Image (cartoon, helix red, strand yellow):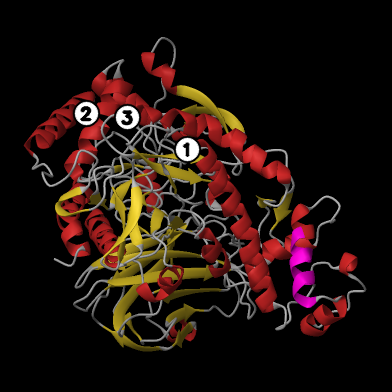
Amino acid sequence: MAAVAAAQEERLLNSFESDTDMSVVAPRDTAIRLTSDGVTHGQRALAIEFRQVQWPALFLRPPAPWDLREWGEIAYDITNPGTTAVRFSVRVDDEIRSDSVVAWRTGSGTIEPGATATFAFPLANRDPMTWGMRGLPVWPGSRNLGSTGTHVLNTGNIAQMQVFLASPAESFTLIVDNVRLRAPFPLTGIVDRFGQFTGDTWPGKIETEEDLERQRHAEAESLMGVDRFDDRSEFGGFTAGPRLEATGYFRTAKHEGRWWLVDPHGYLFFSTGFNSMGLAQTTFTTGREEMFTWIPSGEDPLTRHFSTATAVSGPIRSGVTFNFHAANLERKHGAEYAAAWRSLTLARMKAWGFNTIGNWSDNGLHRRGLPYVTTTTLFGNYNTVPNAGQGTDRLPDPFDPRFAASVRERLLPVLAPVIGDPYCLGHFVDNEMNWGAPGNERARYGVVLGALGQNPAVSAARRALGVLLEKRYSTIENLNTAWGTQFASWSALAAPAIITPGMRPDLAELTTAFAREYYRVVREEIRRIDPNHLYLGSRIHQVNPDVVTAAAEADVISVNVYQAAIAPASWTLLERVDRPAIIGEFHFGALDRGMFSTGLQSVSSQEARGEALRRYLRSVADHPNFVGAHWFQLTDQAITGRPRDGENYNIGFLNVVDAPYPEMVTAAQGLHREIYGRRLGK
């Protein structure tokens, strides 16, 4: 009852009833009017027509900043009078700035046509990571907008808030009313014995061990009755389509203008699967014991699911963890739960139509009738280069002769066991390296600037890039003329403080040269150990065109793309380099089943997640260069955050009790029945 009472602690911020209310309203590329429709407080609400421009918005700007330190969330009642669902965002600023400095956090939601709903923006006066989570719960009955961004709000000085749309495809109208402040949702006792949120209910929520048993039997029956994909080879290739040359291993081929993977029997293969297929959904209990209504103790056999971990961010840098997902599996399957989970996982994959075990997955799933990939992370005793324009992660110096030897040492134990296995699709090496975002010049060329800033006596990259420039310009005077610099000699060459127009072509070419050497060395070391399998690249997450050009040294260019869909106009570079590509990661999340954060792409519901999956994979299949896409990840993250960085996303096909989201399963099965015909144009 204490929590219910606390929920009544509210303060009205604006319900658009008075001249004072309206004095803080500031439209931008919107038309506003008062209306009696959609009223949830008082007599009036505010109708906002968002125009078809990049960032139409409605601001609330007080004459003096609001002090909201005692409040936990901002609630908005939103009505959609139209016939189309509208995706909108809110933004809260603690300073009004005209430069690019971030002084805000944002949240997003979707309102269905004809609906009215309360949306809540968690207004923590500290970053949610203060509690070791990327997202926090809101009061039941509200839809969680989430709170994303790098900035920690000064909630004692809120200068403005806004409701906005991002580049709407047409004009939309929303009605806003009853903007109010609410007490923070208490974090005591938010996790039940099954790892679920205690503060809400939803379809499929488990209340007892008997519920777990019923769910297990129901899924077993559903898997027995599913229609199998009879037009698939033993490797998952499409037997109802063309058959190309069979080599006994996976390869790539361009067939009728489209790139494909080809399975060992010669059948066309479009790779779909999951990353992180494992039993590692742990969360810190150390220092957060009050969040849990139960954790095992004493002789309870479930204490086996305690472990320890370290973190790179958040309030706990090392401590005890508990794995609710694994504990629930033991409750369902007994002491041999891991073996039961592996068998069930493989059966699910085949029933849902997926054909690839993706990155960072349990090795116990390999060699059991489904293709899989390997992954290797490189590190060793060689020079590393910073990206001078972005972040702190360093890149290997591929010109350093010690690099190749180190790559070989790291690859050998991963690749040697699979050299003769036809089910191995190929090898990913590294992930989301700090190549630099293309929208920031110093970041785009940052690896070259970082190398040029190093001492040539210790940096092979600095020496190699200097040689390339000297070959081009012959004299330092010629380079100075082109670059607008005043270097006294080639030995004095350094990273320029300002990027001039004359530098840009050279910096782009040098970035490509640096990246090409990295991919060349890795490719050659893979070939030295394993000539049978594909090199699948490094999973680029910031699509720097100078790097993607170089990534064509791999058999397949891999990119992690968290977007609503693949926009062909954004990927013409792949057609120019004429190489196949694969999506290493994508996902969508929602907050309608007890989770606190959506992940990197948010939608309104599980039904919307299923539709987003279909839309995304159809767009991948429609592009002539893409040969597959892997979802991140199989299972939801713990609601109280994974230890390393607090991610607590609804991004799984499975929840914490190892139950599938039926909306995702239905979408996947339908999609996989059409995808080969779609890609073949039939």
Q: Secondary structure at mark 3?
A: loop
In the rendered image, the vertical position of residue 480 relative to residue 196, given as above or below: below
Q: Return the residue at label 1.
A: 530
Residue 619 lies, in percent from the top left, at 29, 66
Between 175 and 611, the one lying in front of the other is: 611
Judged by its main secondary structure, the magenta piece is helix
Mark 1 vs mark 3: give the one in front.
Answer: 1
Residue 466 within the magenta-colored segment of the rendering: yes
- Is 103 placed left or right of 235 in the picture? right
* Residue 589 appears in the figure: no
* Residue 58 appears in the figure: yes
**Residue occupying the far top of the picture:** 299
Between 578 and 69, the one lying in front of the other is: 578
Q: Amino acid at mark 3?
A: Arg
Q: Quadrant of residue 544?
A: bottom right
Q: Which residues are magenta?
A: 464-473
Disc on the earlier residue, 2 or 1: 2
Which residue is drawn at the image coordinates 8% and 43% (left, top)? Answer: 227
